[in-house]
Amino acid sequence: MFERFTEKAIKVVTYAQEEAINAKHSKLYPEHILLGILREGTGIAARFLRASGLNPEILREKISKIIIIKQQEKISVENLQFSSATKKVLKEAWDEAKALGINYINSEHLFLSLLKENNVSIIKLLDELDIDKNRIKTSVLRVIEKKSKVSFHPEASQKTLPSKLSFFSIPSIFEEKDSLQIMTSAQEKLKNTNFEALGTEQIFLAMLEDKESPLYALLENEGITIEKFQEKLNSLNSRKAEYSYNECLFTPGTFFAISSAYELAKELGSSSIKPEHIILGLLKEKKGIAYEILEELNINTNNLYNKIINPIEKQKPVTLTILRLAKEEARRLGHNMVGTEQILLGILGEGTSIGAIVLKKLGITLKDARIETEKLIGYGDRYSEKELIFTPRVKKLLEIAWSKAKKFNHPRIESEHLLLGIIKEKKCMAMKVLENFGVDVLEIKQGILKAIEEKNYNLSNIEEV
C-alpha cells in the first residue's frame, strides 16, 4: 500500500498510529490521519491548518471526545487495524495525486482525500473547529499546481555543437602532466592483460602506484592500498561492471568517468584534467570495476569524494564562486536551470575579477543586469532545493572558457574566459542582456585585452580572442 508514499506521508501515518495507540483507540480512523498531518507539521496542508489556529493539542482533545470506543490496554502497531474509512482515504489519496499529474503520495494528497464529501466525520470535525476547509483546500491546490509546473528556460531547447568528449584520444584531452602520466601508465597496464579496452581498474592502479601524488597519501589513509586493490582485482573473473554498451577504446565505465572528470574540472575552474578530477569522476559515476572494488573494501565513497573535493573548494577558484552565485541567481528567480544570463550575474556578483571589472567600466552593475534578466526570462514557477542543471548554452560556454584559458596558458578558468565565452555565443541570453545595455562585442574584447595586458598574460594568441 505504501510503495508510492513519500517519507513525509509515511511519517503522517506513523504519527497517526502513535496517536491511536496512545489514546487506546481500537482502530486507526481518518481523524488520526488529520492529527498525523498536523503533527508532521512541514506539509503544505499542515502549514495552512496551523495558520488557521489549529494545533495538535486542540485537535487531540476534540478527537478524544468523538472516538469513545477504547481498548483496556495499549495495543501494538502491528495489531492496530485500519478502519474501512481510513483504508478508503489512503486509496483515494493516490487518486488525488494522479489527478494532479503527480506519481507519488504526499501529505497534502492525504489531506485532500480527507476532504472528500463522503468523509462526513472529518468535514463535521473541521466545521466544529471553525476551520475554513474550502479556503485551505483552494490554497493547498494552488501551491501544488504551482510546484508541479516545470520552469522552461529559453536556452533549454537551444542546440549547441557536441562536446569535444564525444570522441577523444588520451594525448588530446590529458594535457596536464600528472594526468597524462597516469593515463599512460594505465595504458601500459592494459597491454599486460588480455583486454582491448582501457578500464577504470587500470586507471585506479596507476594512481595507487604514484607515491609522489598527494592523492596517494589520502587513499592510503582511507585503507586503499595497491596490494588490497590488486588482490580484489585478481579475484574478479569478469569485466561485466565496465560494460553497458558496445566495446570502444575506453570501456563505457571509463568513458563516463572521464567525461565526468572533464565536466568537474571545468566547473572547479581548472583548465586541465588533473588526477583529482579523474578520481572524482570515478566516484561520481558510481560504476565500473574500480568503484565496485572500493565498495568491497568497505570504503565510504561519499566521504572519500568530499575529502578530495573540499580542499579544491577551499581554494575558492573564481569559476566555482561564479557558478555558485549563478545558481543562487537562478533560485532567486525560481528557475531550475542555470542559463548564461545567470553566469553573467555571477561574474558581476563576484565583483573583483577581470570580467567583473570590465563590465563595471562599461557601466553595467549587478542591480541593472538583474532587472534586464528579469525582463528577458521572468520569474519561474518553483524554488528548487535540488542541484540545478546547466542549460546546453552554459555547457558550451564552459567549453569555450576552457579553450580560452588554454590559449593563454593559464592554469585556471577565470572570469575573463567566461566573458569571452559569452560574447562568442552570440545567441545566448547573456549576450541579449549585454545588448540591451548598448554594449557590443568589440567594447568587451577591448576591455578584456587591456585588462589581461596589465595582468601580464601570454599574449601570443590574443588575436584569437
Image (spheres, rainbow, N blue to C red):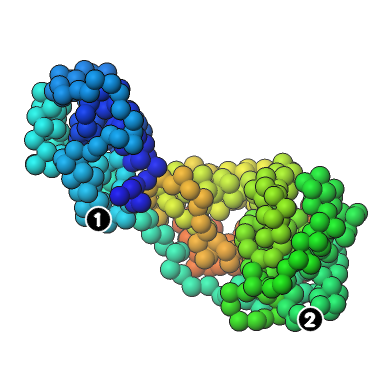
- In the image, taking residue 412 as reference, residue 165 lies left or right, namely left
Position above or below: 241 against 376: below
Q: Quadrant of the C terminus?
A: bottom right
Q: Amino acid at mark 1?
A: Lys
**Residue 405 in view of the camera:** no
Callout 2: few (<14), some (14-19), or many (20+) C-alpha neighbours within 10 Å?
A: few
Q: Could you tell whether 128 is left or right of 446 in the image?
A: left
- 92 or 251, which is in the foreground? 92
Name the one closer to the observer, 58 or 422. Answer: 58
The answer to whether any part of residue 78 appears in the image is yes
What is the x, y in percent for residue 191? 84, 79
Percent x, y of residue 86: 20, 40
Q: Nearer the viewer, residue 190 or 74?
A: 74
> Residue 381's mark?
none
Q: Is residue 113 above or below residue 215?
A: above
Q: Residue at x 59, y 50 (%)?
A: 323
The answer to whether residue 274 is above or below residue 29 is: below
Q: Gap in Å between the C-alphas at discs 2 and 1?
A: 53 Å
Picture residue at 81% right of the left edge, 77% below the top:
193
Disc on res. 98: 1
Is 363 left or right of 185, judged from the image as shown? left
Residue annotated with mark 2: 194
Q: Residue at position x 52%, y 66% from top?
A: 392
Residue 33, position as x, y percentages in the image: 25, 34
Name the kind of residue labelled 2 in the image. Asn
Give how far across and how far down residue 348 sits, in percent. 58, 46
